[in-house]
Image (cartoon, rainbow, N blue to C red):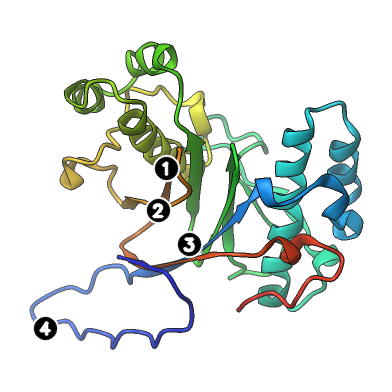
Amino acid sequence: MIIDRLGDAAPEPRTPTADTEPGPAEVDVDLWQFRVDHLAEGDLDPSELDAEERDRLTRPLRVADRLRYGIGHIALRRLLAPRLGVAPAEVAYRREPCPGCGAPHGRPAVDGPPGAPHFSLSHSGDVVLIGIAARRVGVDVETFPEATTVREVTAALHPAERAEIADAGHAPEAFARVWCRKEAYLKGIGIGVARSLDKDYLGERDPAALPEGWAVQGVPTAGGHAAAVAVEGPMGRVRTSWLPASFVAAASPGAPA
């Protein structure tokens, strides 16, 4: 269930019956979204970024790409910092082993003590989306694609996903919803689109057919975009919030808990 505010009281824990083995505990996910079109490059405060991130901002990318990158990485540091008990500039990252080959180019993670939060970052069009959870998590946001992209990429998807998109008349919105669910899951497991796109079912019709051990759901977002979140284990509350442009500026307010 999507909740549009933070700070609600946690649900009462359920006690398993004597003849039932307790399953994995539900995991809550906190999501934050930003509107890119409310900011300019000069509004950002890159002082808390590390050398690699600052170098990325100097590359000859399109202004929109630099803006999305800067917003996402500044905001991520400011959201993680209070959870780690450090300043935003002191947040350090590492790469987990790739689940496909074992090389250190898997999903990004906090380089910190055991129990550090997991995170995922995505941006597309006018939206930046960040997810933080106690277990592996993946998020994705995408603008609605052109019709040619829908038909070309749909052909590579799982047969049941292709059927869902076809039944929706290959509508860009229907494709984007399925694609975001798949991308969120692939980012969560740490392999991305290097994994064959027809291997896993991440559609909306058959929750029982989703990859074992993962929960996936769509996320309300800005018009013309689709978004989704995937988390390892049963999904608890998904708390989502839109943060103001001032959060990534020099005079940023404190990070929300």
**Disc with the residue nearer the chain's start (4 vs 3):** 4
Q: CA distance from mark 2 to mark 1?
A: 17 Å
Q: Which mark is residue 17?
A: 4
* Location of residue 183 in the rendering, given as x and y in whole percent from the top left corner: 45, 36
Tag 4 secondary structure: loop
Q: CA distance from mark 4 to mark 3?
A: 26 Å
**Front of the two marks 4 and 1:** 1
First of labels 1, 3 by sequence position: 3
Between discs 3 and 2, the one toward the N terminus: 3
Query: Sequence order check: which comes first, mark 4 or mark 2?
Result: 4
Q: Residue at x 85, y 71 (%)?
A: 251
Please identify the quarter of the rendering in which residue 166 is found: top left
Task: Look at discs 4 and 3 and give the one toward the viewer.
Answer: 3
Is label 4 in contact with label 2 (beta carbons under 8 Å)?
no
126 with respect to 197 (left or right): right
Read off the residue under disc 1: 185
Q: Which residue is mark 2?
A: 220
Cα separation between marks 3 and 2:
22 Å
Q: Which residue is mark 3?
A: 135
Q: CA distance from mark 1 to mark 3?
A: 13 Å
Between discs 4 and 1, the one toward the N terminus: 4
Does residue 12 lie above or below 46 as drawn? below
Count of picture labels? 4
Q: Locate residue 218, reporting x and y percent.
A: 35, 49
Q: Amino acid at mark 3?
A: Arg
